[in-house]
Amino acid sequence: MKVLFVYPHPDDESFGPAPVMHKMVREGHEVHLLTLTRGGATKERHKYNYSVKKMGSVRYKEVKNVAEVLGLTGVNILDLPDSKLKEMNPLEIENVVREEILKIEPYVVVTYPVHGVSGFQDHLVTHAVVKRVFEEMKQKKWFLRRLAFTTVDAKSVKLIKSIKLNHSTEDEIDCVVSVEQRDIDAGLQALDCYKTYQDVINRVGIKNVVTKPYSFEFYQENFNTPVSDLFAELPSE
């Protein structure tokens, strides 16, 4: 089966469900990643005296390396304005997301939840745009069955340092995916691909949660006992 992960920045996948993505590839699924921006506006660029364009070029190469580590079927890295998605006409963002969905024909689309985990504005815009496109397309396209949201539970939040994160409640979590050591190793290698972000990675302690099960919400679905796979019990056409 096919799954498309949609995030605004390089590293969103590695700070999130990279081990799950590796596991899904290992299990024979097609796993695609769409990154809306190149992440060039990050404050980390100042450490290297990089312009937004130069930092975006560096991070483009870093996420390409991540795609190789995880064995992704495909990765598409766009160049929409980092940290300025809220200033864009949302229809323009919807168009590129719709185009990618039509190209790949995924059964499942994954993006950020309504709270954006970190609450960053680009995360919130991406959630709204992807949900809007999914809602528009799901009745017209046979392949679209589920919209899932990458999230964290209360226990995982406590392992992260120096930044405040939002989490989903037990009632909101519909899927919990456990990963094997080889998937964890791939997730750690993916984080290591972001050479320009190692200070952030170490400061927030994101590697502390790589070994934990990964939580997802499902849009307009409710599993009181969470399923263990993003493709489990897919809604019918």
Image (cartoon, helix red, strand yellow):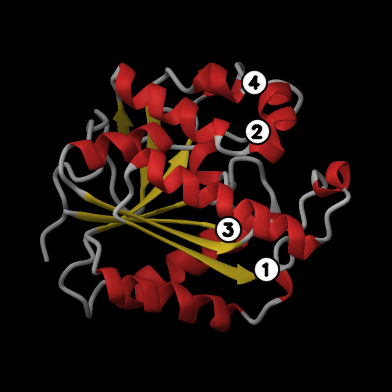
Residue 142 left/right relative to 106: left
Residue 179 percent across, percent down from the top left: 30, 24
- Categorize mark 2 by other alpha carbons within 10 Å: few (<14), some (14-19), many (20+): some
The amino acid marked with disc number 2 is Leu
Q: Are marks 2 and 3 in contact (CB under 8 Å)?
A: no
Q: Secondary structure at mark 1?
A: helix
Q: Secondary structure at mark 2?
A: loop
**Which residue bears the numbered disc 2?**
165
Quadrant hosting residue 237: bottom left
**Which residue bears the numbered disc 1?**
85
User: Closer to us: mark 4 or mark 2?
Assistant: 4
Quadrant hosting residue 39: bottom right
Residue 25 left/right relative to 75: left
The amino acid marked with disc number 4 is Gly
**Disc number for residue 205:** 4
User: Closer to us: mark 2 or mark 3?
Assistant: 3
* Disc nearer the start of the sequence (4/2): 2
The amino acid marked with disc number 3 is Pro
* Disc nearer the start of the sequence (1/4): 1
- Which residue sits at x=16%, y=51%? 234
